[in-house]
Structures are given as C-alpha cells and as structure tokens.
Amino acid sequence: MAVAAIPPERQEKNGKFGHTGGAVLIDSMHALCAAHCFMVANAATDKPYYKLYAGDFDLSMGDAEQLHDIAMIRFNEPADLSNPSIKTIKMVEDTDSFAGNDACWITGWRRACNQKEQLRLTHPDGVNIPVTTNQVCQQRWRRAGIVGWLHTIMAIHICVDGEAGEKSACQKNNKFVPTGITSRGSPDCEKQPSVYIRVSKYLDWARSEIAKL
C-alpha cells in the first residue's frame, strides 16, 4: 500500500529537527502536505530549515480554520523510488465522495486516542476508518456550539470518523488513491469527525505547480 511509505516533514528547532506533519509523495520531485505545516515559515529564507524524510519509520529520536490547507513541496533532488519502502500514489479526478467506502485508511505519525490519554506514536500507523458525508459532518460539528459553527464544512473537505491521522487514502478499482490531508479535528477524536482537505479538488492546481519545474 503506497500510503505506508509516506514521509514525515521535520522542522529544525534548537539544532534538532522536530516532526511537523506528514506528506504524500506524488512523484519523485513533489509531495503534498497540509499548508499549516508551513504556517510560520518564510518561503524566501526558511527552506534550509525544512527536511523531508522518505522511508523514515522511527521518530523516537528526536487548529485554526484555513480555507486551502494544502501545500506543494518541491525537492532539491529526486526521491529514491528504487527504495521498496518509498512509493508514489496517484492523484485521481474528483468523481467520488468515498462516503461509505469501507476500504479507507488514515496513516502517519498521529496522536492515538486512548480513552482520555493521547499517545505520541514513534512509528507510523494505519487505521481503517469510515468516511462520512459532508452534510453529516457539518451537522455533527455544529453540535459542538460556536466552534462548530465557525468551522464550515465545504466541498473541498472530506470527513472521517475516529482517530486523526496525517493523510487518508481509499481503495478504488483495486488501487489506493489519496483522498485527504489532515486539516483539523476534535481533540478526543470522537465527538466530531476529523476534517481533511479533499485532495481531488486540487488536482488541476497540483498539475500546474508541477509544470512550473
């Protein structure tokens, strides 16, 4: 499954790189991630302070509303696609809501909800999760009061129940396709669905960014 080899980004802080989020590799030179991973970055000066680790499976070493919470990462050097632990995943046209698809997974270095505690995982994990319709997602978020009313669910979103990962993928025609990049969610992972940016809504944008290379 391609999503099992998705790399995390790390941001340098005090001489050490700390995990800031996950990314999905779409070709040897590009990956997609949530834009909030670069919320405090300066595009002109901060590039040396970000690294993308492909095939890194051990992190033990050391949410505000955003409309278009998605970013394109362009590499200085191509990813090593000869490494069996590093796979790309193909973006698809926006033709499926994936609601009710029982072959959808979230993956990444997520915070696992364990009753009232949250455990920081040091290895990537994957969880099979149900995808809800955007209408149901909006209804459940509005039950949260003012916070839910401020967070409008739009066509560019896809919502899943359960724990929050860093990206989601669903099986379609016997292949996994990227469906979402995490944007926000409920701290306890249960009361409201987790909200992801719907990757298929940005296919044309991704193509235009890749063409700039």
Image: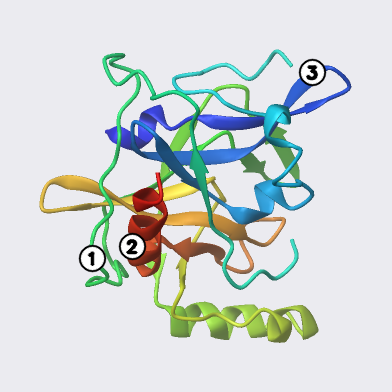
Under mark 1, the amino acid is Glu
Q: Nearer the viewer, residue 25 or 110?
A: 25
Residue 203 numbered tag: 2
2 and 1 marks in contact (CB < 8 Å): yes
User: Which residue, as the protein is rendered here, is positioned at the far left?
Assistant: 173
Locate the N terminus and report the quarter of the image it occupies. Answer: top left
Q: Residue at x 64, y 67 (%)?
A: 191
Secondary structure of residue under mark 1: loop
SS for dot 2 = helix
Q: Nearer the viewer, residue 74 or 169?
A: 74
* Colouring used for the render: rainbow
Residue drawn at the location 29% of the way across and 68% of the way down: 100
55 relative position to 194: left or right: left
Q: Quadrant of the C terminus?
A: top left
Q: At which x and y percent is residue 52?
A: 56, 28
Identified at 49% across, 61% down, the residue is 161
Q: Label 1 neighbourhood size at 10 Å, few (<14), some (14-19), many (20+)? A: few
Q: Is residue 84 left or right of residue 65?
A: left
Q: CA distance from mark 3 to mark 2?
A: 34 Å
Question: Is 96 located above or below residue 148 in the figure?
Answer: above
> What x and y, as percent, mark residue 168?
42, 50
Say which residue label 3 marks.
16
Q: Residue furthest right?
A: 14
Say which label, 1 or 3, has the lower sequence index: 3
Is label 1 in contact with label 3 (beta carbons under 8 Å)? no
Image coordinates of residue 105 in percent, x first then y, are 37, 47
Query: Mark 1 highlights which residue?
Result: 93
The residue closer to the viewer here, 204 or 166, is 204
Query: Is residue 160 visible to the viewer in this orientation of the structure?
Result: no
Front: mark 2 or 1 = 2
